């Protein structure tokens, strides 16, 4: 069995640059198998727009002629919508459909981490080598990353690098409720102006009723655990996991979970510290994206995050986490031996 608390992963910027591809959960997606909800035309409109972009951007860049300007500026596309409407599916589909040169698929956290580790000059040089950056879960959490991102985009997009991103927040509302965004409105506006926005409406496809799925009972958890190969299983208490995550940057969570196919988290309890809660959210996001099975026992999922958090600046992050945890619990029940009750 794998002991996550004994893992202290280090990740170099070069490691990250080499790993920027869609995670296993999105390995087989395409525009063809994205099924838009007919009740929400914006889903089909987003698919059509991104498919057209991928085809257009895949064409060879015209050779520069005398008296012509430099390479055409990269296009920016911003998928705005709630969780569970298929934005990451569309983002990964764009990545796969793009045939115009080097490309990278990464999370916003990984992008910021890499820029910080390399420094702006080296990061701009490295990422300018890509013709497409597909960035998942775009968000501005503080003035520092607002300034960093504005500078970065101004360095890479004029050189012909396209940027397609997903977010749960409208471009003009980035940063609201998290810092004094009005003081940085010029930079936020400059970032937003680089993108054409595609709204993706619709209900959460993972929802099964209004309430989150229940954690596994001790009996269900034991059966699920028995069905997992010991060599790829990590099983630990929630408190120990949270304590360990405080010492691991979210950009390293992928390496923390290397070789892990299942994580059991026993005795989950409400998280009153927002730093602890947000790191747990990032951990669930990474496990979900990697296709890692996650089974939990303990408190009802709806009680893990205080109402003040679930209705505050990071509300959509917490709602997405509960949505994904619910799906993971249903998957865990299905993976356990037949005969166990399901919710």
Image (tube, helix red, strand yellow):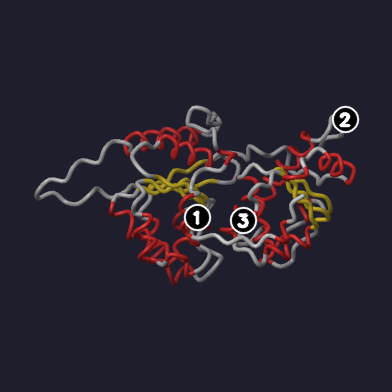
284 lies above or below 42: below
Q: Are marks 2 and 1 in contact (CB under 8 Å)?
A: no
Q: Judge whether 60 appears above or below 188 on screen.
A: above
Q: Identify the residue at horizontal 44%, vertical 72% (top origin).
A: 183
Looking at the image, tell me whether mark 2 or mark 1 is earlier in sequence order: 1
Q: Is residue 302 above or below residue 330?
A: below
> Residue 15, labelled with which disc?
1
User: In the rendered structure, which disc, 3 or 1, sits on the residue that comes first in sequence?
Assistant: 1
Q: Position of residue 29 (x, y in %)?
A: 53, 33
- Mark nearest the camera among 2 and 1 is 1
Q: Which residue is mark 3?
A: 253
User: Real-space Cα distance between discs 3 and 1?
Assistant: 13 Å
**Does dot 3 land on a helix, a strand or a loop?**
helix
Instruction: Tell me which corner region of the image, top left, top right, bottom left or bottom right, holds residue 283.
Output: bottom right
| Crowd tier of the residue under label 3, counting other residues whose Cα lies within 10 Å: few below 14, some 14–19, many 20 or above | many
> Considering only order in the chain, which callout, 3 or 2, is on the residue closer to the N terminus?
3
Query: Measuring 64% from the left and 45% from the top, which residue is drawn there?
Result: 288
Residue identifier under label 2: 339
Q: Residues within 10 Å of mark 2 (few under 14, many from 20)?
A: few
- Label 2 element class: loop
Closer to the camera in the image, 276 or 80: 276
Image quarter of the C terminus: top right
The percent coordinates of residue 222 (x first, y second) are 87, 43
Q: Nearer the viewer, mark 2 or mark 3?
A: 3
């Amino acid at each position: 069995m794998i002991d996550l608390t004994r893992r202290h992963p280090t990740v170099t910027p070069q490691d990250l640059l080499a790993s920027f591809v869609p995670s296993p959960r999105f390995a087989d997606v395409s525009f063809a198998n994205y099924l838009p909800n007919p009740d929400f035309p914006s889903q089909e409109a987003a698919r059509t727009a991104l498919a057209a972009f991928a085809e257009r951007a895949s064409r060879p860049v015209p050779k520069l002629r005398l008296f012509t300007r430099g390479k055409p500026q990269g296009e920016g596309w911003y998928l705005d919508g709630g969780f569970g409407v298929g934005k990451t599916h569309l983002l990964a589909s764009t990545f796969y459909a793009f045939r115009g040169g080097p490309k990278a698929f990464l999370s916003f956290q990984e992008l910021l981490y890499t820029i910080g580790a390399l420094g702006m000059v080296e990061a701009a040089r490295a990422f300018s080598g890509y013709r497409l950056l597909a960035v998942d879960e775009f968000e501005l959490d503080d003035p520092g990353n607002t300034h960093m991102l504005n500078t970065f985009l101004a360095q890479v997009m004029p050189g012909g690098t396209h940027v397609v991103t997903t977010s749960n927040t409208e471009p003009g509302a980035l940063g609201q409720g998290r810092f004094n965004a009005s003081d940085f409105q010029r930079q936020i506006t400059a970032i937003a102006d680089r993108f054409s926005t595609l709204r993706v409406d619709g209900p959460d496809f993972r929802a099964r009723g209004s309430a989150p799925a229940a954690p596994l009972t001790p009996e269900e958890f034991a059966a699920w655990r028995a069905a997992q190969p010991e060599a790829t299983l990590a099983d630990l208490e929630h408190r120990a996991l949270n304590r360990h995550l405080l010492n691991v940057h979210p950009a390293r969570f992928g390496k923390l979970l290397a070789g892990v196919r299942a994580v059991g988290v026993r005795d989950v309890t409400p998280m009153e510290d927002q730093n602890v809660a947000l790191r747990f959210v990032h951990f669930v996001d990474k496990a979900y994206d990697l296709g890692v099975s996650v089974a939990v026992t303990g408190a009802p999922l709806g009680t893990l995050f205080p109402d003040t958090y679930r209705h505050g600046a990071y509300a959509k992050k917490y709602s997405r986490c509960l949505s994904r945890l619910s799906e993971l619990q249903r998957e865990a029940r299905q993976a356990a031996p037949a005969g166990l009750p399901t919710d």
